[in-house]
Amino acid sequence: MRRSLDQQLGSFLRQKRGQRTYAQFARKLGIAPSTLYRLENGEQSVTLQRLQQIMQRLRCSMADIFHEEQ
């Protein structure tokens, strides 16, 4: 079963956060820790503007975040 885009983003963010706290990683992304928590857990959808900000700060592309699953 394919994961939703929200789930793919959440998984990507969890992986990138690693052992850092929500506060540390949220500061790097320029968002609130509570927003990061909700994004990671699929409780909030990302806006295109916020997604662009995250990609710029992590120096990644949409293809890095959202990929086809077999």
Image: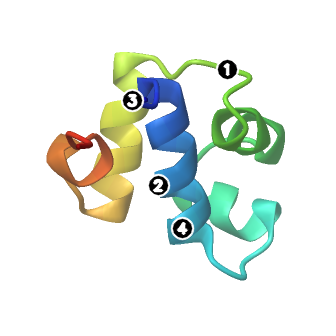
Q: Nearer the viewer, residue 10 or 23?
A: 10
Badge 4 density bin: few <14, some 14–19, many ≥20, Cα 10 Å: few
User: Quarter holding the N terminus?
Assistant: top left
Label 2 SS: helix
Q: Which residue is mark 1?
A: 44
Q: Locate residue 44 relative to residue 37 in the image: left or right.
A: left
Q: Which residue is mark 2?
A: 12
- Amino acid at dot 1: Gln
Q: What element does badge 1 sit on?
A: loop
Up the image or down, 44 lies above or below 68; here it is above
Q: CA distance from mark 1 to mark 3?
A: 19 Å
- CA gap between label 4 and label 3 equals 19 Å
Of residue 47 and residue 62, the one placed in the foreground of this image is 62
Earlier in the chain: of badge 1 and badge 4, it is: 4
The mark that comes first in sequence, 4 or 3, is: 3
Q: Which residue is mark 4?
A: 15
Looking at the rendered structure, the kind of residue marked 4 is Gln
| Residue at 74% over, 41% down | 32
